[in-house]
Image (cartoon, rainbow, N blue to C red):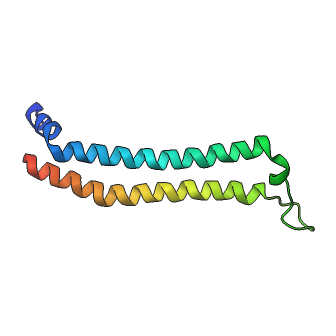
Amino acid sequence: MSDDIYQKIENNPRFKALVKKRGRFAWLLSIMMLVLYVGFIFLIAFVPEWLGTQLHENTTITLGIPVGIGIIFISFLLTGIYVVRANGEFDRLTSTLLNEVGK
């Protein structure tokens, strides 16, 4: 692409809106994951006996196992949410933008 097309894209208000919207969404999901992960670390640091509590009498599985698995599951879920939105809304906005600037 020529520098002229890059300038048209960069100066387009739709591009600025796309960058802002995508960035805000990525930060939101990142903060959610960070809060969950740091919360888990704080549980390990300050309430290890709670995480070490057995699920029931006759098992060696503790509460820490499902909590840890839950955090891993949530990270996959948040990634999936981002991918769905990126492949849907963000790709549509990008396509509209490229059509506007004449690519």
Q: Quadrant of the N terminus?
A: top left
Q: Nearer the viewer, residue 26 or 98?
A: 26
Q: Residue 78, percent across and down?
A: 50, 56
Residue at 56% in and 44% down: 34
**Residue at the far front in the pictured view:** 46
The residue depicted at 63 percent of the width and 46 percent of the height is 37
| Horizontal side of residue 52 vs 4, given as left or right | right
- Image-based side of 52 in relation to 94, left or right: right
Front in this rendered view, residue 18 or 1: 18
Q: Position of residue 76 (x, y in %)?
A: 54, 56
Residue 16 located left or right of residue 56: left
Q: Position of residue 5 (x, y in %)?
A: 10, 38
Residue farthest toward the top in the current orientation of the protein: 3
Res 103 visible: no
The x, y position of residue 45, in whole percent, is 77, 40
Residue placed at 9% from the left, 46% from the top? Answer: 101
Which of the 4 image quarters holds residue 65? bottom right
Residue drawn at the location 63% of the way across and 54% of the way down: 71
Please say whether residue 100 is visible from this viewpoint: yes
- The image shows a total of numbered marks equal to 0
